[in-house]
Amino acid sequence: MIKKILLTIVLNIYLFANSTLIVNFGDDEELQVQQYKSNSKKLLIILPSSHGITNGLKNLAKNLQKNNTEVWIADPFSSLFLPTVESSLSKIPLESYVELIKQAIKTNKKVYLFSNDKASAVLLKALNKWQHSNNDILAGVILLSPNLYSKTPVAGDEGTLLPIASATNISLKLLIPSKSTLALRIDDTTKALKKGGSHVDIKILSNVRDRFYFRDDASQAEKTMALEFASIIKDSMIDTLKEAKQREAIEIAKLEKKKKKKDNTRWLNQYDGKLQAHDFTLNDIKKQSHTLSKYKGQVILLNFWASWCPPCVHEMPSMSKLTNDLKKQNVPFKILAVNLGEDEFEMSEFLDEHEVIFTVLLDPNKDIAKQWKVYAFPTTYIIDKKGSIRYSVAGGFDWNTEAVKELLKKLANE
């Protein structure tokens, strides 16, 4: 009996031991891969985002390993001496990931891929390259918050999806945090992926932000979701396997077009886009209605924000100071801050804790944000007295500067 128990312990140590796999590619180049071994028939390859191999990612791998799934985490940053920053993603040789997929297929396990954020595009490009020289069937791809846009557009402009979105032909599961800009634009991403022939299934993750499973400022809801993440991944693997089949690779070069470079400097860009100032009526937390067109004759700062977005909250004091300063100078100016999808109770709590002296409006279904082409939080438009969009900025901004005040006073005097 004792021998049997000892044998079981030894076998478990062997089967679930972690090790490092070296994948050779190119001219004597190597990709290091952390292996969380299992005797399971399922193998999940994780290609990390620009945040690198976080503790959250390691915990996910360990939890999956405990739940009968083998996990391989690629480490291109250490292997290629790249800093863990977004710009490094474009420097990862696709061939390294192609060879990694080939190694995984040789295990005769059902192979799945996982990535998130902008690393999702690198995964899909590597997968497309692999498809061109392999006829094996991949069990599926799981993407968390997949950012497949070429860049954050100037506020008011349409975002441009990367060609790989339409050149992907695979069984996909998209995990979309409800508190993310991607939740507003998921239809565009899904449409492009389906155009290439992909089967796309979507799961909305309620009440969490991007990168919820390794955030230092994680809310209780995000901590709870992090504990459930391994189960969510396993369920997603079951879903993608249902639609797994051999699919024809798409030639990505045919979809690539040269685009003119556009200035996206973090300043108030003079707006020359096609977006019109769509009128709307929304309520504040006291259920008083506000209609945009009724504020004609004043310069309007229209701000789209959320309380869980740090840059949104950080810029609010400067917005309050701007309001005070221009009021003292009798400048016809108004701030309308449209909140994205949070309820009256959440807003009441937030406004009790923060000194906000401008008007906060509720957009519960995010319809107005979609109409105004919001791709980043916060997004702000400056509207002149006649109701035309004159300036825009995507991202946090310091509004309490003399340059901003002079610009707004100039618009008010037109």
Image (cartoon, helix red, strand yellow):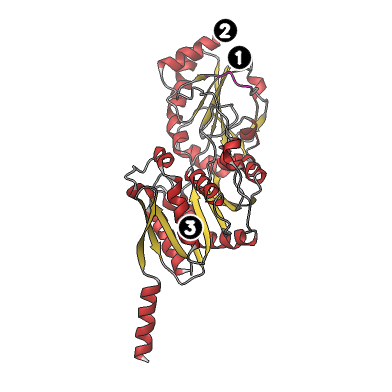
Tag shown at residue 385: 1
Asked whether residue 291 appears in the rendered view, the answer is yes
Asked whether residue 227 appears in the rendered view, the answer is no
Whether the magenta-drawn stretch holds residue 207 is answered as no
Single out the mark in the foreground, 2 or 3: 3
Q: Quadrant of the C terminus?
A: top right
Amino acid tagged 2: Glu
Q: Secondary structure at mark 2?
A: loop
Q: Which residue is mark 3?
A: 102
Q: Secondary structure at mark 3?
A: helix
Q: Which residues are magenta?
A: 270-274
Name the residue located 63 percent from the left edge and 20 percent from the top edge: 295
Q: Does 356 appear above or below 223? A: above
Q: Are marks 1 and 2 in contact (CB under 8 Å)?
A: yes
Q: What is the quadrant of residue 370 in the picture? A: top right
Q: Position of residue 336 (x, y in %)?
A: 57, 27
Amino acid tagged 3: Lys
Q: Quadrant of the N terminus?
A: bottom left
